[in-house]
Each structure stands twice: as structure tokens, then as C-alpha cells.
Image (cartoon, rainbow, N blue to C red):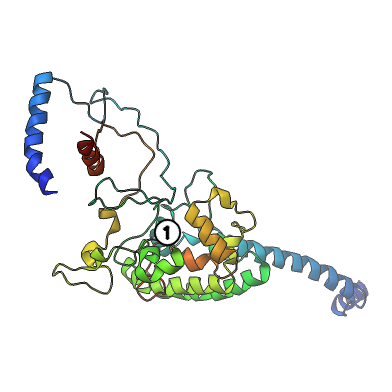
């Protein structure tokens, strides 16, 4: 995270300079559609609903939700996610328990259940749709990077 | 002339010894058909969504919430209306439920949930009545459409398959035990087992 923070401005400048040099128009999500025109929206796609745990791309990544969460109510009244992922519910549901890190309050005290600041699951955990990424991405994870280094 | 009038009057005044049976039977039958038809028509009228959302309590709270859910809007366009889930289809149980519903008329008259605030305050209570009813009748209203026999498990997601195989098909649990809050928003669930 820290490395990214340090590198981010440098990267941003690099991208900016690169863009200026290449003078490539930046494609926005509306593509070539003129501003007064109404573009054709992309088709809605299905949710990834495999229920298989997905490997994280980097250790700090909040695990993505491998199932649909349509209509899941998470508010002051109830938390639908916790009706399976709460510690006491995992036996019946077979779902992974909410990480113990989520029980810690801002004074670094571990509490009996999920701390209010970690209560809103969808702030970090999101389901995925079956779509092609909008921009090209050649991210490689750190293990692959290290393996490549070792191989040199 | 006077005699004729007198004889007519006598006929008119004297009880009809033979016609009465026929009149009573036929008249009773016709009146019965009319009453029964009228009663059922009126009953069925109260069993429509149009009737339910005729009151702002239903229209602005529970019906507005239903509209965002899969029981109102979905790919196939088959949808559930209020009585599909809240009134048993079978006659005796329907009448029993309709008699209970007289309390809802009372509530309407005295404005028990006439504002959003009052409704939210009362929501847990109301929801618990429905959960208790559906637990007691083994989620009968769900099963009017969703039959366990017709569920194709292979078309369900993995966790749905597992949960249904373990809890539904063995009869350990009934639909409402897990599927709460599918058509309306949930009340404060902190006192409900299995929720936080």
C-alpha cells in the first residue's frame, strides 16, 4: 500500500507526460458517442455465481463475493450477509466466517462481533459480473513477479 | 262484486298451504345463490392487490418495497400479488384469515400505522405475525408456486443446492426460516434468532 502511495504521483506524472507525448485521445466510457447523443448501453451481464472462493490478486485485497447479492439488506435493521457469515452461523451455512480483523474497533480492541465500522460489507466486498475489463490491465501478482526474478 | 272482493281478500289473507313450500324452496334457492355469489364476489374483491393498495398504509410502505424485489419484477414476468402470499388459497383457511383480517380494519379505522413512523415502529410485530403464520403452515403460500418437487437443483447455485438438500428436503426447515425479507424490507432483526 505504501509503495503504491509513493509511486502513485510518479506514475500519474508518467502517464500524463506519456499521454501528452502520444497525444492519444482518452477513451471515456461513452466511447465515440457525441455528448448530445444517447449511446447504446452495453447489455447487462450475469453475476458470477459460482460459489467458489476466488484467489486474491494481492494479499490486502478484500475477497470478492463469488455469489449474487441481489436484494441483500444491509442496514441499521439487519445484515443479510451475517446471517451466513457470522461466527455463530457458519456451522449451518458452511460460509467462511467474517475475518477476526473485522471485530476490532478503532481502539484496537477485539469485540464480540463485527465492529460497526466494518459492518457494511459492500464497502469493500463486491460481487463480479461476467465482463471484459474496460481498460487493458497487465497486472501480475507479487508471486509471479518474484518467480520471474528468481528465474533470471 | 263485494263477494268477489271478499273472496279475493280471503285468498290473499289466508296462508298458502301448497304454494308456500315451492316458494320457500325456490325463493330460498334463488336468495341463497344471490347471497353466496354476492358474498364470494365481495370476498374475492377484498382478495385483490387493487383492494390492498387502496389504502395508503399498504401502497406507500409494503407495496412500494415489493416493487424492487423479484416477486414484482423479473425476467419471466410472472409475479406475486399481495394475496398470493398473505391469504391462503384454500377456502376454510381463507375464511379464517379473512376473519383475522377484521383486526386490520380496526387498525385502519384507528390509524394504527397511519404514518411511516408508526409503521416502522410496528413493523417487527407485524412481520413476526407473518413469520409465525408461515412457520405454522409449513410456508404454504410459498409452496403454492414454489414446489420442492419441481425445483431443479442442478439449475441452482452450489450453496442453494446444498442448503435445500440439507434443510428443505429433509424437512428440517421451511422456506420462511431462511427466506425472510425477500419481498419487503426487514425490521430490526437483532431479536430474531439467526440474525444480527
Give percent across and percent down for residue B72: 48, 51
**B63, A20: nearer the viewer:** A20
Query: Which residue occupies 6% across, 32% down?
Result: A13
Q: Quadrant of residue B56?
A: bottom left
Q: From the viewer's perspective, is residue B41 above or below residue A139?
A: below
**B129, B112: nearer the viewer:** B129
Query: Which residue occupies 64% across, 61% down?
Result: B41
- Which residue is at the far bottom? B14
The number of numbered discs placed on residues in the rendered structure image is 1
- Secondary element type, mark 1: helix
Using residue A115 as the reference point, say whether residue B145 is left or right of it.
Answer: right
Locate the C terminus of chain A by quadrant: top left
Q: Quadrant of residue B1?
A: bottom right
Give percent across and percent down for residue B98: 58, 71
- What crowding class fits label 1: few (fewer than 14 Cα within 10 Å), some (14-19), or many (20 or more)? some
Q: From the viewer's perspective, is residue A46 above or below residue B23?
A: above
Using residue A52 as the reference point, say whether residue B175 is left or right of it.
Answer: right
Letter of the chain that mark 1 sits on in the rendering = B
**A48, A97: nearer the viewer:** A97
Query: Which residue occupies 31% across, 63% down?
Result: A98
Q: From the viewer's perspective, is residue A94 above or below residue B132?
A: above
**B53, A42: nearer the viewer:** A42
Using residue B34 as the reference point, say whether residue A34 is left or right of it.
Answer: left
Give percent across and percent down for residue A83: 39, 66
Residue behind mark 1: B59
Give percent across and percent down for residue B87: 57, 66
Amino acid at each position: 500500500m505504501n509503495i503504491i502511495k509513493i509511486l502513485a504521483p510518479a506514475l500519474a506524472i508518467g502517464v500524463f507526460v506519456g499521454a501528452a507525448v502520444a497525444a492519444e485521445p482518452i477513451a471515456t466510457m461513452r466511447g465515440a458517442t457525441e455528448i448530445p447523443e444517447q449511446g447504446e448501453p452495453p447489455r447487462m451481464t450475469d453475476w458470477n455465481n459460482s460459489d467458489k472462493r476466488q484467489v486474491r490478486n494481492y494479499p490486502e485485497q478484500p475477497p470478492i463475493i463469488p455469489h449474487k447479492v441481489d436484494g441483500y439488506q444491509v442496514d441499521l435493521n439487519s445484515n443479510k450477509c451475517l446471517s451466513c457469515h457470522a461466527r455463530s452461523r457458519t456451522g449451518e451455512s458452511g460460509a467462511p466466517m467474517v475475518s477476526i480483523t473485522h471485530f476490532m474497533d478503532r481502539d484496537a480492541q477485539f469485540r464480540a462481533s463485527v465492529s460497526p465500522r466494518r459492518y457494511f460489507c459492500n464497502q469493500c466486498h463486491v460481487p463480479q459480473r461476467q465482463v471484459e475489463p474496460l481498460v487493458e490491465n497487465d497486472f501480475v501478482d507479487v508471486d509471479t513477479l518474484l518467480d520471474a526474478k528468481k528465474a533470471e | 262484486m263485494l263477494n268477489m272482493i271478499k273472496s279475493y281478500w280471503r285468498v290473499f289473507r289466508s296462508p298458502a298451504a301448497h304454494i308456500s313450500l315451492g316458494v320457500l324452496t325456490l325463493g330460498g334457492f334463488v336468495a341463497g345463490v344471490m347471497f353466496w355469489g354476492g358474498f364470494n364476489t365481495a370476498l374475492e374483491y377484498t382478495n385483490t392487490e387493487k383492494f390492498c393498495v387502496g389504502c395508503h398504509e399498504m401502497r406507500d410502505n409494503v407495496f412500494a418495497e415489493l416493487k424492487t424485489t423479484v416477486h414484482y419484477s423479473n425476467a419471466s414476468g410472472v409475479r406475486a400479488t399481495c394475496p398470493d402470499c398473505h391469504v391462503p388459497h384454500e377456502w376454510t383457511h381463507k375464511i379464517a384469515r379473512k376473519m383475522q383480517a377484521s383486526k386490520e380494519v380496526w387498525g385502519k379505522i384507528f390509524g394504527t400505522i397511519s404514518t411511516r413512523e408508526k409503521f416502522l415502529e410496528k413493523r417487527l410485530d407485524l412481520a413476526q405475525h407473518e413469520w409465525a403464520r408461515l412457520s405454522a403452515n409449513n410456508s404454504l403460500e410459498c409452496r403454492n408456486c414454489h414446489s420442492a418437487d419441481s425445483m431443479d437443483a442442478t439449475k441452482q447455485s452450489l450453496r442453494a443446492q446444498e442448503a435445500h438438500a440439507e434443510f428443505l428436503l429433509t424437512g428440517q426447515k421451511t422456506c420462511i426460516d431462511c427466506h425472510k425479507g425477500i419481498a419487503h424490507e426487514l425490521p430490526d432483526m437483532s431479536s430474531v434468532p439467526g440474525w444480527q
